[in-house]
Amino acid sequence: MKIFLSCDIEGVSGLVDFDDGGLNGKRYPDFAKIMSEEVAAVCALFPSETELFVKDAHMHAKNIPLSAMPDNATLMSGWSGHPYNMVQGLDESFDAMLLVGYHDQAGSDGSPAAHSFTGEVYSLKINGEYMSEFDIALMTASMLGVPTIFVMGDERITQKAGSLVPGIVTIPTKYGVGAAIASRTSSYNIQLVNQSKDQIEQILAGDKTDFIIELPKKFEIEIEYSRQHLAYHNSFFPGCELSGPRTIRFETDDFYEALRLFHFVI
Ligand SMILES: [Zn+2]
């Protein structure tokens, strides 16, 4: 069995805002530790013969120390420059993908740390729908035929996951109110992870096709930036057009081309 995990920080227990997740944040070391512990708890759901591949996918992608990982895990730290971005390392050979520390999307109000990929993206839409990092990970995994079976993160993203993938195991860590969050403790949320073991085993033993979404036939992508000059600059990407003062538009029927676009313009 091969299991892929992608891990972010903004959705972990207790983290409030970008300051908490940034290198200069006074509380950053605490949250890097909580992120590592929550990821380790998810790793521990699997027996030692399971091959785990863990992608550290926040900021410089060097938040999780290798020493926090079990011996059956391979940890990818840093950014290679591959368009799969937060799920780099994923391929058709994996039996399932699990996401930890995921969070609400740009253009939404479910978390003070809501964003999609960078702070410069005011909103990212595909076919008129706001896209989160979860959506993009889910679509990438679905493109590769890999089921997305688990997401742990803020309440808003776990709700979205539940509506897009009925049956997915969701562990909400906290919810946002304006510039605040209200969170359960990490140890409580880790107990919920431990309690999900049977459910995960059942999913893995059954027909997992329900955890793979059907991708749209066509992707009409609209990216609105916080600053107008970025839209102007990025509108020169092949196939892109400037559709508003801060917005670019791109159309494709191949999701990989959408990932290539994101790789260069966000
Ligand atoms: Zn993120």
Image (cartoon, grey):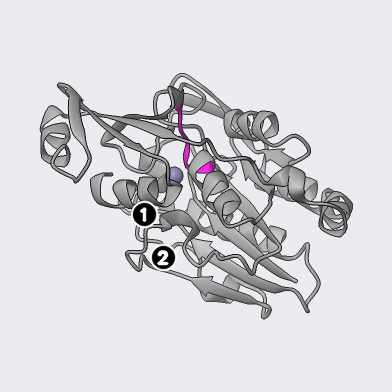
Q: Which residues are magenta?
A: 130-134
Would you call the spot at circle 1 few (<14 residues within 10 Å), some (14-19), or many (20 or more)?
Answer: some
Would you call the spot at circle 2 few (<14 residues within 10 Å), some (14-19), or many (20 or more)?
Answer: some
Question: What's the residue type where badge 2 is placed?
Answer: Lys
Q: Could you tell me residue 67's position as x and y percent?
A: 57, 76
Residue shown at 81%/72% (left/top)? 47
Q: Is residue 56 visible?
A: yes
Residue shown at 37%/45% (left/top)? 258
Mark 1 highlights which residue? 59
Asked if residue 221 lies in the magenta stretch, the reply is no
**SS state under label 1:** loop
Question: What's the residue type where badge 1 is placed?
Answer: Met
Q: Nearer the viewer, residue 230 or 54?
A: 230
Asked if residue 132 lies in the magenta stretch, the reply is yes
* Mark drawn on residue 62: 2
Q: Quadrant of ligand 1?
A: top left
Residue shown at 22%/41% (left/top)? 239
Q: Could you tell me residue 198's position as x and y percent?
A: 89, 53
**SS state under label 2:** loop
Q: Quadrant of the C terminus?
A: top left
